[in-house]
Amino acid sequence: MKFRVVIYSMAMAMLATTSGCSNGGNGAGATADTQKVEWSLRMADSHGIGDFYCNTKHRDSLATTPWDYVSGLVASSLLEAWKLHPERTDLYEAVMAYADLATKEDGTGIQKYNGMDALGPSNIDDLAAARIYFDLYKEETKKGNNDKAARYKKAATLVRNKLKYEHRRIPQGMEGAGGFWHKMRYPNQMWLDGLFMGPAVYARWQAAWGSELGEEDNMASWADIAFQFKNLFAKTYDAEKHLNYHAWSADVDDVNSFWARKDGPNKGCNQEFWARAMGWYFGALVDVLELMPKDHPDYNDLLKIFQQTAEDLAARQDKKTGLWFNLLAHDESAQADGIGDLINGERYNVGTSHNYTETSASSMFSFVYMKGVRLGLLDKKFLQVGKTAFEGVLKNKVSDADNGKVNLNDICASAGLGPVSDPGRSGTLNYYLEGSDTKIVKSNEGKGVGAFILAATEYERL
């Protein structure tokens, strides 16, 4: 039975039938049952089909948006909304148009507007949007559009093989050998973000077609996927803070790893716990566990990591709002120190901005908690954690727009670490609150929109 959140009192419904929440963000506070809304569709119509940002670039239409991990998340969230509301064929068609814009007719390449390859050398972010191919393949096969289905399967296979066979890995002889580099410009670095971008797509391919290559290859590929999580968990987990650092470098002496700790129990890690990085990580875990054979030797190890992460994040949920702070180990009292970070004799990240509750991470956490309970991967006690978070986003982060749409607010545009040419990206508290990219906090940014729609689909299933 679908649960649809009530958004108006009886009196308010008489006055404003198109609005989902007040400009102050108090949209979920009413309790009357006279008007309800499916929030996955409300956000899809407001900022999913079009009118969203990829980092700081505005996109008018998903169908005409270039291949990118941000637009890919928006597209994959629309597919989840469509599966829940199959009458909304326009959602599916928008995603198919997005895929077809980038995918060569024969499925042998994914390209940018200018015809250049959209999959950069060992750039794990470039692989993430391929998650849409699997649902497109299923639907086109069901419709008897075999040529189109084959196109999507070939493109998905291209991405899987590019990751498995061509992507740079930490070499033998180094700690963490076999781990996927995040990008070529970040040599021997693994970031939590990358697990969602690469291994989670790899897992979808294995679940769909891995058996075609034989059981031995399939089991080895699942072990490869699991290793990425187990390796990064071991390197980034802080046993005292019970959180995972944003990233880890296997080579702390490399100039591009200037941000990495040089020694200690979390050698190679940055200094802070960034919420969206853990959102990507948590989301990747639930996606992989949904698909991974339960009799695989690594399954229980991943399940244990997932359940540990669920416990750790629940302990950090803000009791007042139901959300999570951008820097997970701190509350709103934390702020940049006004001095900044001294790097190579220069000051970066100077300011006094405070920590804040961040929408993309809170939405992703909400989604994963509800999905994890639905799949039987998490204890039922976590359902309330996810529900409270989604309702907290509605109350605190969703506001009316003048055009009848809603806005989704307080989304961190971007964050990263290095490389040496970008010394301000230092992985410190100052950086995550005052960095040139992190201090851009936008409304309707795709990473928030996509995560919100995913959370809304789970909320509507309750």
Image: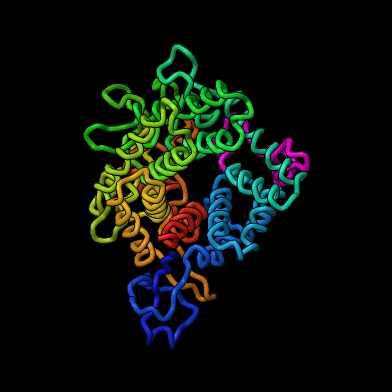
The foreground one among 316 and 417 is: 316
- Inspect this view and state whether residue 263 appears: yes
| Drawn side of residue 232 relative to residue 212, left or right | left
Q: Position of residue 387 (x, y in %)?
A: 34, 59
Q: Position of residue 262 (x, y in %)?
A: 32, 23
Residue 122 lies within the magenta run: yes
Occupied quadrant, residue 296: top left
Which residue is depicted at the point 59% across and 37% down? 208
| Drawn side of residue 321 relative to residue 130, left or right | left
Q: Position of residue 188 (x, y in %)?
A: 47, 23
Which residue is depicted at the point 46% across and 47% down? 414
Marks counted in the figure total 0
Q: Position of residue 97 (x, y in %)?
A: 69, 54
The foreground one among 311 and 437 is: 311
Instruction: Give the vertical position of 187 relative to 25 (above or below).
Output: above
Residue farthest top in this picture: 173
Which residue is depicted at the point 58% across and 53% down? 75
Which residue is depicted at the point 42% across and 84% down? 13
- Inspect this view and state whether residue 439 appears: no
Residue 70 lies within the magenta run: no
Q: Quadrant of the C terminus?
A: bottom left
Main SS, magenta residues:
loop
Magenta residues?
102-128
